[in-house]
Image (tube, rainbow, N blue to C red):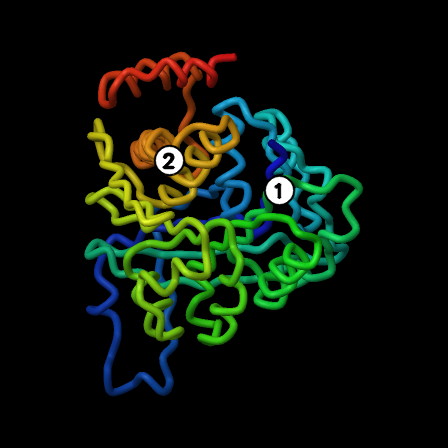
Amino acid sequence: MDILLTGSVAYDYLMTFPGHFKEQILPTRLESISLSFLVDSMSKQRGGIAPNIAYTMALLGRKPRVMATVGEDFADYREWLESKGVDTALMKVVPGLFTASFFATTDHASAQIASFYPGAMAHSATQSIKELDKKPDLVVVSPSAPDAMMKFPAECRELGIPYLYDPSQQILRLEGNELARDMEGAEFLFCNDYEFGLISKKTGWSLDQILEHVKVLVITRGKDGADLYTDGISVHIPTVPEDEIVDPTGVGDAFRGGFLSGYAQGFDWKLCGEIGSLAAVYCLEQKGPQSHAYSREDFVKRFRKHFDDDSKLDALLK
């Protein structure tokens, strides 16, 4: 199955401040605030939803394609993705711009001050599914520039291509009628439980009403696992116990990568969800959304420690 991933591509610059922001802020001087925090650590992580999903899919033996706009600083990132098995041919460099970047400083109380620079991501809508030489079997529409998130579902509907709609962080920017329009006819809707509440509030649709417009709804619920709804049935997907919790960044993307890897193999919903659940915990146990690694043999071995033995899973080893 040829799965095309669209969405953000970014560098994450993560810093830690050895104190508390609240002790440095004067409430009576907010109109003239001017602060500089001396941080004691910084890491640069490869990020962005589309390549995060693609990375896990590649670990599980898939060859996903990513379509996105990136900056002139993307060369090393491209080389990394290609070395892992991700097809980056449709990742277009925008001259004169940097790749989107996320700058976040976290204090000892886990309070965070952050900035996001969209950079080349702002040009996502200059690309078009209509111009592809090869028509994909499934398109993933994940957060990027709002105009691109509206363009790609419309093109999929026009071309008759199934798509997975994953508005997540951009839900706040989208109106209820825009969400409703792009959920209409979607093969999948993915969201977490808080995002589901926002979607329901903005559209006025209940869970049953949403299922009148999308074929499959997957709601992730953190430590409580995930739930899948389709064709009058629901499937609960439990979490896998973690060895340790290091960093939750990218866990949802890893879940999607695992789920889609199972879907590409034609597995049933329960097995797709379980693969996603295990892929997610591998990410949780490392710092950054693309720091986890495993062989497919190790993945299957750990899977069978927590879930029912399923011979179909052997397809991941081929």
User: Residue 298 at what x, y percent from top left?
Assistant: 37, 14
User: What's the CA distance linking mark 1 and mark 2?
Assistant: 20 Å
Q: In this rendering, is residue 281 above or below 208?
A: above
Q: Residue 238's quadrant in the figure?
A: top left
Point 73% across, 55% down: residue: 128
User: 95 and 182: which one is in front?
Assistant: 182
Q: Is residue 73 left or right of residue 141?
A: right
Q: List x then y, in percent, for residue 224.
A: 20, 44
Q: Nearer the viewer, residue 197 or 209?
A: 209
Q: Which residue is mark 2?
A: 269
Q: Residue at x 42, y 24 (%)?
A: 293
Q: Earlier in the sequence, mark 1 or mark 2?
A: 1
Residue pictured at 25% horizontal, 20% vertical: 308
Amino acid identity at mark 2: Trp
Q: Position of residue 104 (x, y in %)?
A: 40, 56
Percent across and percent down for residue 191 are: 38, 54
Q: Quadrant of residue 274?
A: top left
Q: Is residue 23 above or below residue 53?
A: below
Q: How many marks?
A: 2
Q: Which mark is residue 4?
A: 1
